[in-house]
Image (cartoon, rainbow, N blue to C red):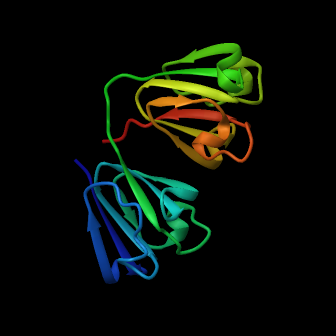
Amino acid sequence: MGKIIFYEDKNFSGCHFESCSDCANLMCLLNYCNSIRVESGSFMIYEKPNYSGNQYYLSPGDYPDFHHWNGVNNSVSSCHLIPMPGLFSVRLYERIEFGGQVMDLVDDCPSVMDRFHINDIFSCNVTKGNWLFYEHPHYRGRMYLIRPGEYKRFSEWGGRNARVGSIRRIIDY
């Protein structure tokens, strides 16, 4: 179970909205979001409604302004609660529709290039756990939430290109 509180003003003031689950459109509840408190669980927040736009991963803690979650502005329009499974497994492919070289991963990978000697992941199949794909090595750059399921091409997880520099399991509670 998770709990997140969105505030219109910085430093946890002004109108607010509490959620314990997914919310596809926060814009009908708040005009903008300048601070967030995650009381429990982990959440992925999105810049646009219906889980689109820039994504930001938030673990329990206080985020007094959008700079603290590395946001580029105060636009937060949807959120996903991330369930916490005990096991992790993802199969990565170097081509779309599960083609080419196959790579299995059950732990964090700070550098896809160092570990698998490739720069791009075009498709994947997540059988266990929730993962974050980062554009650059060492968990930097744009991030994407990868939930259990099949992704036949990188655009299905919201990627602008197939570049995946690092991969991390979501294990915060």
Asked if residue 167 is positioned above or below residue 1 in the image, the reply reads above
Q: Residue at x 48, y 59 (%)?
A: 50
Q: From this view, report whether residue 115 is shown above or below residue 64.
A: above
The quarter of the displayed image where residue 135 is located: top right
Q: Is residue 114 left or right of residue 158?
A: right
Residue nearest the viewer, comparing 36 with 155:
155
Q: Residue furthest bottom?
A: 14
Q: How far from the left and from the top, in percent, is residue 49? A: 49, 64
Q: Is residue 91 left or right of residue 98?
A: left
At 57% from the left and 45% from the top, the residue drawn is 144
Where residue 143 appears, as percent x and y from the top left, is 59, 47
Of residue 96 and residue 84, the one placed in the foreground of this image is 96
Q: Residue furthest left?
A: 1
Can you say whether 58 is above or below 71 in the image?
above
Q: Residue at x 48, y 68 (%)?
A: 76
In the rendered image, residue 25, in percent from the top left (x then y), is placed at 41, 67
Q: Looking at the image, which is closer to me, 60 or 159?
A: 159
Q: Identify the residue shown where x is 74% and y is 25%.
A: 113
Image position, residue 169 (x, y; %): 47, 32
Q: How many marks?
A: 0
Q: Classify 139 as above or below 60.
A: above
Assign the C terminus to one quadrant of the image. top left
